[in-house]
Structure formats: C-alpha cells, structure tokens
Image (cartoon, grey):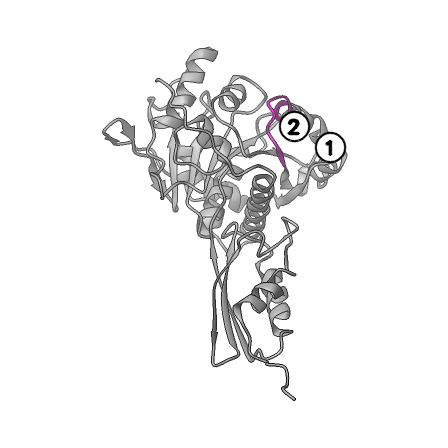
Amino acid sequence: MFGKSNRVTKDMVLGALQQVQEPELHRDLVTLNMVKDIEIANEGDVSFTVTLTTPACPLRGQIESEARAAVQALPGVKSIQVKFDAQVRADHRIAGKLDVPIKNIIAVASGKGGVGKTTVAANLAVALGQMGARVGLLDADIYGPNVPIVMGVDEMPDVMGDKMMPALAHGVLVMSIGFLVPEGEALVWRGPMLHKAIQQLLTDVAWGEPGNELDYLVVDLPPGTGDAQMSLAQLVPLTGGVIVTTPQAVALADAMRGITAFQRLEVPIMGIIENMAGDIFGVGGGEAAAHKLNVPFLGRVPLASVVRESGDAGTPVVACCPDTEQAEVFRKIAQAVAAQVSVQNAKRPAVAKAPIKLEI
C-alpha cells in the first residue's frame, strides 16, 4: 500500500561511501575517517567533503569519480557536490622521540656524490609546498651545504628566544649549516660534533608550533653512508628514505649502498629517483635498480640545462619554470612521495609516547 521512500539520508550516503576505497591505503573512506560535512538539501541534493591524507594526493580524481558513482547509485539522489580538503597524517613516532613540530621526515640520500641529490631535495620540497603542504628543507650535508645556493638564500637566521628562525624561500622553510659558517670555510668535524650540529638544526629551529606543524621536513643528507645518516636516524624516527641515482648501469651498486644503509637504520624505503636521464648518461639504470631491489620507482628526471641553470640562480625549476617537462616530473615525484608517506603512516598505530626533550 505504501511505496518505498526515496528520501536520501546521511546514513545512506555513508553506507555508499563505505564501498569506496582509498587507492593507496586500500581501506574505505569511512573507516579512514575521510568523509565529513555530509549535507542533504531539497531531498536529494547531496554534498560532502573528503579529507585527503595529503594535498599532493595523486589519485584525487579517481577518488572523486568513484565517490560520485557510489552516491549517485542511491535512489533519490538528484545532484552531488564533492569538496576536498587535506590533513596530512603524522608519523607519531617522531613526537615520541623529539619535541619538534614536525609530522613527517623524508630523508633524501644517494650512494655517491654528483647525482643531483640537493637539486632533487629542493624541487621535492618546493613542489610539496606548491600543492598546499607546509614544508621545511633541512640541509644536513654538514661538509658540503649547497641548499642555500639552490634555494637562493644566504642570510644568517634571526634568533627569537632560544630558537633560530629558518629562512623562507619559494614557500619553504629552509635551514642549513651553510648559514652559520663563513662562505668557503671547511668544517673538519668528527662524529660527535656532527651529531650535535644535526641535533641542533632539528631542535633549535622554529619549524612551527603545535597546531601549525610542518607536514613534511625534507632532509638533504650528505652523499654516501656515513655519520650524518646514523646521527639523524638515532635522533629521530625517519618516516622514509628516498634514494637519488643516475641512469648508468653502475647505479645499481650505488643505490644498493644507500638502501642497505637505510635498512640497517630501520628507515622505510620510499623509492628511487633516476636523475639526469638521457644524453650522455643514458636511461634506465635507476629504474632497473628499483626493480632489482624491489622498491618503488618514483620517477625519472630528464637531463636538461634548465634544471642546472635554475639551481645556480637560486630558484628551483618547479618555481621558475613550472611548464617544463622537468617541473612536471618533479611534481609527480612529489605526489608519489606524499603517497608513500601516507602508506607508511597507515601501517603504524596512531599512538605517540610522551615527548622526550633532548638537552642541547
């Protein structure tokens, strides 16, 4: 006698969205608490917000398409409005070890020098910032700090209270030992002094404050597998490590050294980036290394003078030349790295121990 009601309810919308998986995390949007602000107007006009795990989400389009399709299948739905915001999830191990306003730490390393590691780290940081994340770039290459050149900053940091203020360049907070020593001066430090310097660059810098933490701190490590890598890993949990290599066949050996170092330090491997691909360097060594070592291949940056020229001028290519092929590749690499951060954090329990303040 009475027909079924076609009135759409919030519970019905939640039920539909429970069938939609986050493609990287392989869990549904509702279980991941990614759905909020469900509104239903005029008995069929549905709107809701999806909170992404990173503003650099590479699969936003897929999530939107599948969410729309799931809700559209409900009887009585007239229109759908999908909104997006982002909340980068934190690696809670960091808060359990150090009292620093940083959600995630991404270490960029290489098996040897001369592969463009600093250029990659700078463009990765700027690209993440351009996508809406709050990003810092820490130059931990104590013996050869090049971040100030690539980012176009050379001023000594101001001090407020007991904290150094990082420089701001291209939307990224920047700190380097290069700001604190005279230009061209060599630092001849043994392990304990280097360890202390890295500790201070982490804890004595005003990276943010509670409620306004860095989403990502990108750390440019020195080449090789020495004291800096060990010091950083001992001081604070690293959310993941990225290896930069060149395309030659010998890249496999270099990448292996970098990955082995991270594995011994219990740092998750986010993947390999093949830099300076093409022309005299060839193509494919980095990708082959990734497949051989069973780690993600994050992307290939084509060799081009614009990358070198922009770095020399202090403006990373993603900032100065956003329409170039190289800038587009760096943006895709940034998205891939952000996705890896989300995956790594999803594997960890969301529980943090009480912060431990280190004495400086």
For residue 79, above or below residue 99: below
* Amino acid type assigned to the residue bearing label 2 in the image: Ile
Give the magenta part as a residue range. 261-271
The image quarter containing residue 67 is bottom right
Q: Which mark is residue 37?
A: none
Q: Is residue 241 left or right of residue 215?
A: right
Residue 289 percent coordinates (x, y): 72, 34
Residue at the image point whose x is 73% and y is 32% from the top: 293
4 above or below 28? Answer: below
Q: Nearer the viewer, residue 26 or 327?
A: 26
The x, y position of residue 236, in whole percent, is 48, 26
Which residue is at 50% across, 31% downward? 93
Quadrant into which the C terminus falls: top left
* Image disc number at residue 259: 2
Marks 2/1 in contact by CB < 8 Å: the verdict is yes
- Residue 202: image location, x then y, percent: 40, 27
Give SS at disc 2.
helix
Q: Residue at x 61, y 64 (%)?
A: 15
Q: Secondary structure at mark 1?
A: helix
Looking at the picture, how far across and down is residue 169, in whole percent?
Answer: 37, 42
Residue placed most toward the observer, 166 or 24: 24
What amino acid type should be assigned to the residue bearing mark 1? Answer: Leu
Q: Is residue 269 magenta?
A: yes
Instruction: Give the residue pinned by disc 1.
Output: 293
Give the side of residue 147 with respect to residue 208, left or right: right
Give the residue at x 55% y 78%. 7
Quick one: label 2, few (<14), some, or many (20+) residues within 10 Å? many
